[in-house]
């Protein structure tokens, strides 16, 4: 097994390498492959409030 390349942690706390996650999204849509929670990446949005 190769070491993770560009590890991404989702809001549901599951983690994947970027290439594996992209492959999963292309096959099953924007959801966690493990728990099926809508896909969002921690740190994907800037801090603060929208005005």
Image: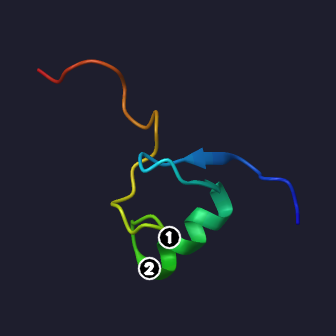
Q: Mark 2 points at which residue?
A: 28
- Quick one: SS at disc 1? loop
Mark nearest the camera among 2 and 1 is 1
Residue contact at pointers 2 and 1, CB within 8 angstroms:
yes
Q: Residue drawn at (34%, 20%), measured in percent from left and top?
A: 47
Q: Which residue lies furthest to the right in this view?
A: 1
Asked if 16 appears above or below 34 in the picture, the reply is above
Q: Residue drawn at (59%, 47%), measured in percent from left and top?
A: 8
Seen in the image, is 5 located left or right of residue 12? Answer: right
Location of residue 38 by image quarter = bottom left
Q: How far apart are marks 2 and 1 (CA)?
A: 8 Å
Q: Mark 1 points at which residue?
A: 33
Q: Which of 14 and 40 is in front in this view?
A: 14
**Earlier-in-chain disc, 2 versus 1:** 2
Instruction: Tell me the quarter of the image containing the C terminus.
Output: top left
How far across and how far down the image is residue 7, in percent?
A: 67, 47
How far across and how far down the image is residue 45, in percent?
A: 37, 33
Q: Which of 2 and 22 is in front in this view?
A: 2
């Amino acid at each position: 097994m190769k070491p993770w390349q560009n590890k991404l942690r989702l809001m549901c706390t599951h983690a994947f390498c970027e290439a594996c996650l992209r492959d999963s999204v292309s096959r099953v849509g924007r959801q966690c492959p493990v728990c099926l929670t809508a896909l969002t990446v921690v740190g994907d949005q800037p801090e603060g409030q929208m005005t």
